[in-house]
Amino acid sequence: MSYRIIATLLTVALVCGSVQARTDLGDWGNVMKLSVGSKIRVATRKGEVLEGELRQVDNAAVTLLVRISQSSRQQIEIRREDVTQVRRPSPACCLRCWGAGIGLGVGIAIGAESMRAVPAKIRVWGN
């Protein structure tokens, strides 16, 4: 029974964390709050995805410094109406932690269900 409670609590924690992180997604004010120099990824209406360093943002546009080649960079301005999505790239360790958490929750849930299916007489946890 305690395994089931732990699995439920882990699932609720993961769901609540992802819902909380996704508030006010359509607000341009969130883009304006980003600090200059931060790395961002911008998706446009044309389907392009540009990743670079934030140089400037105002009510009309966002300006990025994008790496064109190994040695050159170009400053690109994208109008507000052309922007469909702005994100900060997630570090790889963050993605690994999410994967580990989800895997742990699923493993506990499967283990709890398999323990429930085994008759009580057969369960042996030690001597």
Image (cartoon, grey):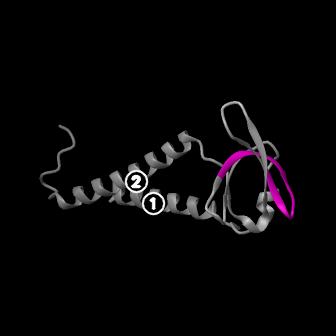
Q: Nearer the viewer, residue 43 or 89?
A: 43
Instruction: Kindly indicate the quadrant of the structure image that contains residue 87.
Output: bottom right
Which quarter of the image is occupied by the C terminus? top left
Does 116 sit left or right of 84 as displayed? left
Name which residue type carries label 2.
Answer: Gly
Label 2 to label 1: alpha-carbon separation: 6 Å
Q: Is residue 60 magenta?
A: yes
Residue sitting at 87 percent across and 59 percent down?
58
Point out which mark residue 112 bears: none
The N terminus is located in which quarter?
Answer: bottom left
Residue 49 picture location, percent across and down: 63, 54
Is residue 52 found inside the magenta-colored segment of the image? yes
Callout 1 secondary element: helix
On the image, the x and y values in percent for residue 81 come to 76, 69
Report x, y in % for residue 111: 28, 53
Count how many numbered circles sit on residues in the image: 2
Amino acid residing under circle 1: Thr
Residue on which the image places disc 1: 11
Q: Say whether residue 85 is left or right of residue 121.
A: right
* Cβ atoms at labels 2 and 1 below 8 Å apart: yes
Name the N-terminal-most of marks 2 and 1: 1
In the picture, measured across the screen, residue 69 lies left or right of residue 6, that is: right
Residue 19 percent coordinates (x, y): 58, 65
Q: Which image quadrant for residue 118?
A: bottom left
The residue depicted at 23 percent of the width and 55 percent of the height is 115
Q: Relative to the observer, which residue lies in front, 9 or 124?
A: 9
Q: Residue furthest top?
A: 71
Q: Residues within 10 Å of mark 2 (few under 14, many from 20)?
A: many
Question: Which residues are the magenta region?
Answer: 50-63
Is disc 2 placed on a helix, strand or loop? helix
Q: Which mark is residue 105?
A: 2
Q: For this rendering, which residue is in front, 15 or 81? A: 81
